[in-house]
Image (tube, rainbow, N blue to C red):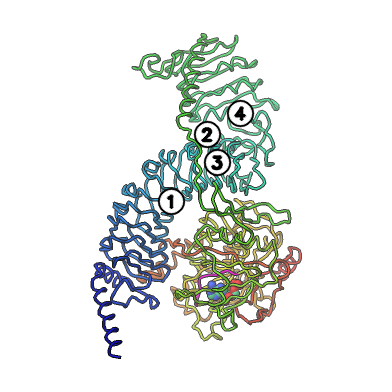
Amino acid sequence: MAKSHLFILLCFLLNSVSSQTTVDEPTMQALKSHLNLTKDVDWSNPNPCKWPTVECSNNRVTRIQLNNKAIRGTLPSNLQTLTELTVLEFFMNQISGPIPDLSGLTRLQTLNLHDNLFDSVPKNLFSGMVSLQEAYLEYNPFSPWEIPESLKEATSLQKLSLTGCNLTGKIPDFFSSQTLPSLTSLQLSQNLLQGELPPSFGASSLQKLYLNGQKLNGSVSLLQNMTSLIELDLQGNAFSGPIPDLSGLEALSLFNVRENQLTGLVPPSLTGLKSLKTVNLTNNCFQGPTPEFGKSVAVDVIAKTNRFCLETPGAPCDPRVDTLLSVAESLGYPVKLATSWKGNDPCDGWLGITCSGSNVTVVNLGRQGLTGTISPSFAKIASLETINLSNNNLTGTIPNELTTLPKLKTLDVSNNDIYGGVPKFGDGVAVVTSGNANINKDGPLSPDGGGGGGSKKSSSVKIIAPVVGGVVVAALCLVGLGVCLYKKRRARPAKVQSPNSHVVVHPHHSGDGDAIKLSVAASSVGGSSNSQTPNSEIHVVESGNLVISIQVLRSVTNNFSEENILGKGGFGTVYRGELHDGTKIAVKRMEPSAVSDKGLEEFKSEITVLTKMRHRHLVALLGYCLDGNEKLLVYEYMPQGTLSQHLFHWKEEERKPLDWTRRLAIALDVARGVEYLHTLAHQSFIHRDLKPSNILLGDDMRAKVSDFGLVRLAPEGKYSIETRVAGTFGYLAPEYAVTGRVTTKVDIFSLGVILMELITGRKALDVTQPEDSVHLVTWFRRVAASKDKDKDAFKNAIDPNINLDEETLASVQIVWDLAGHCCAREPINRPDMGHIVNVLSSLTVQWKPSEADPDDLYGIDYDVPLPQAVKKWQASEGLSQTMDDSGSSSSAYGSRDNTQTSIPIRPSGFAASFTSVDGR
Ligand code: AMP
């Protein structure tokens, strides 16, 4: 007995001695005191090496991994004393203040601080970090900063993500494989970067390059040399000029250049790439034939948003179009021409083109700011009588071929930078060459460079200019040789590294009326060993390992016990659970009856799509499970349930009614989440089923949009997708209900209805109301129409549970108008989500002028995406339900939130129902 006491005492002493001798203890204690640790992080042991989420080796701290724990506070300034650190991770918390100086952490391999509230970055952030392999700082509200020069010192860097970090300035020019030899993934999306692509990209080993959503511009010609590329996203910039020869990019899988100003023909070197899985060319100025890609490629080209000659993929253009496009090619395919030169008939109002019948007789492109050279292709337009290219910045020579034009009367190239001799034209051709300093000289040499020289001098109109054919040919040869040599020097052999298997999303047109569906393809590029069997497909989602085993999910939900049921929706039942690390989760379990092959495919592809959408106001997908018949999605747990509970069932649930400030904040959160879906995600998505039961609330009553079961890729501009109508009665935009046509404006309508509900406290459909007031939108419009005459009608329409003082009333009035605007009958008259965000944020700022709660900063941009947005499994027709007008749930578990169940509806049947409630 005495011996065992002695032993325990010894252990205790040893333990305390060892904890005292940890040199890192003071820093770790400082860290602890700076952080506002939540209960589930127990850092009470005197020895930091014993703290959960901390690891030591040889009594030195080597890893700190305190992720996703809702931790606030700041980081202490002395973290750089932890010189043995290899992993430093605090991602997905609410830590604020500056990122401290970490320079000199020579052993640090992983720095992961994404999704926090850090406000600044030290200038020497990467100094001396020679072991750093991965750095993720995305989605922090940093004050504007530039990519630091010290990044060059992180010579082991493989992956860098600075997405949504408020980066400004230019992309520095040190990304070549000489400087950063291991860098394969660079994510700089959603910043404020400007300028052109740095030349060093062309000499880099980058496999993934994400630069979408910035102000970048200039040419993309250096892509030709980025032969390691697998994923490229340049969406939403201002890049111009043509796509270069991409035949060397033999591993390229994703090519997204949507929303730029790219011009020219889509080259066969892109359409012919065998590795290609996803292409997005929409909203550019591409010309020529609509490209035709292989069947396995998911293509988003939307012909109408470009300048193709015909909409049918692969259909050849009229020869006149081909010829004029090769003229444009020599001019670098200027945007000005691309904007006007669309369609298949140049005689149909093309800029500078005049026709006689269907024959082009005049090309008049004087004073258009053109650069480039004069194309010999002019010679193919035999009907040409006049070519005017005067007062531009053209260089090169006058092509000899032009002398063969039988009807040519005038060639005016005056006031350019043309050099060389003037070819011998036939009698009666007026050739105007004045204002070209080097005309009749050997080349475009400077005045003191010999050869050419001279200032721009006037040489008047000549009829039949002297022939200096030999000089022209020599000059052309020189230029040609130069180009060849240049190309040869730049071309590098295709280098295919071996990435992990990855997933590509395939939006494709299906034959069944749903215009765009999503499917998934897993591909192993470059001999990756990650081969997939049908049952191992669950590993294909690229963004981290999201797979959670069925055993874990059974255990954390107490075998899906009834007492853990949170609710029931169209997908199946949702259960509460808690992972061993304390993370609370919500588990959606698909009804086994809903499983089919098609469904499985959709389930997987939606996971793939939605893991790419991450936003603070979209409920996060934490993981998923596919195991035999079991299909489950795991979400972050939203402890305060749904907005509909708080708005319509607060009494039964013994809650307080929502005050106006809270309602406004919720509306703004939702608008921000949906704005991201519409415009800020990699692609534009439409939710299609916005309603209070799909808005979930956290403990802080901040709202997140959930339930992405009906999400569809958004069509471009005014063009809309015709799709099977789905959604919820009361929230459906009329055009969608009647025609099945869906644009982002259907979400605007639904949000308008939600605003009406927030103002009035009434449900979108309320059968307890008199017959003419059942449908909220109709009733609201009636009150709005009488509002000016009858002030009381407006006041009486406001939820009596809102405390109305003068200020509140003014604020309600603005939201009232906004709601009416959102629910305009014509989609074109509804605002876009950006406008709604602006209106609501101006009100919340007014409303919370001096409240300092850092979590309630409505005035700042809240695109700090925590989660990945998610698709709810939408059961096929078998799961269809009919609207329960009584407002009671059809759920076996009686969840109050399912009073308005999403239902796929056949358009004709639904149109009739809608008309009856809308009264139109
Ligand atoms: P749903 O699949 O949307 O239709 O979900 C059915 C119900 O489950 C909802 O109305 C909520 O009450 C509950 N629920 C769904 N997701 C969550 C979540 N992430 N956290 C808490 N409750 C949830």
Labelled pair 2, 1 in contact (Cβ < 8 Å) = no
Q: Is 326 inside the magenta-drawn segment?
A: no
- The residue mark sitting in front, 4 or 1, is 1
Quadrant of the image containing the C terminus: bottom right
Q: Amino acid at mark 3?
A: Glu
Range of the magenta residues? 632-639
Query: Disc 4 versus disc 2: distance between alpha carbons?
Result: 13 Å
Reading the image, the residue beneath label 1 is 188
Which image quadrant for residue 807?
bottom left
- Label of residue 334 in the image: 2
Residue closest to the eye, 329 or 198: 198
- Labels 3 & 4 near each other (Cβ < 8 A): no
Q: CB at mark 4 closer than 8 A to ligand 1?
A: no
2 or 3: tag closer to the N-terminus: 3
Q: Is mark 3 within 8 Å of ligand 1?
A: no
**Would you call the spot at circle 3 few (<14 residues within 10 Å), some (14-19), or many (20 or more)?**
many
Left or right of 618 in this view: 48: left
Q: Kindly state the secondary structure of the residue where label 4 is placed.
A: helix
Residue type (three-letter) at the residue carrying disc 4? Leu
Residue on which the image places disc 3: 250
Q: Are marks 4 and 1 in contact (CB under 8 Å)?
A: no
Q: Can residue 28 be spotted in the picture?
A: yes
Q: How many marks?
A: 4
Q: Earlier in the sequence, mark 4 or mark 1?
A: 1
Circle 2 residues within 10 Å: few <14, some 14–19, many ≥20? many
Mark number, residue 324: 4
Sooner in the amino-acid sequence: mark 1 or mark 3: 1
In this view, the residue in front, 507 or 782, is 507
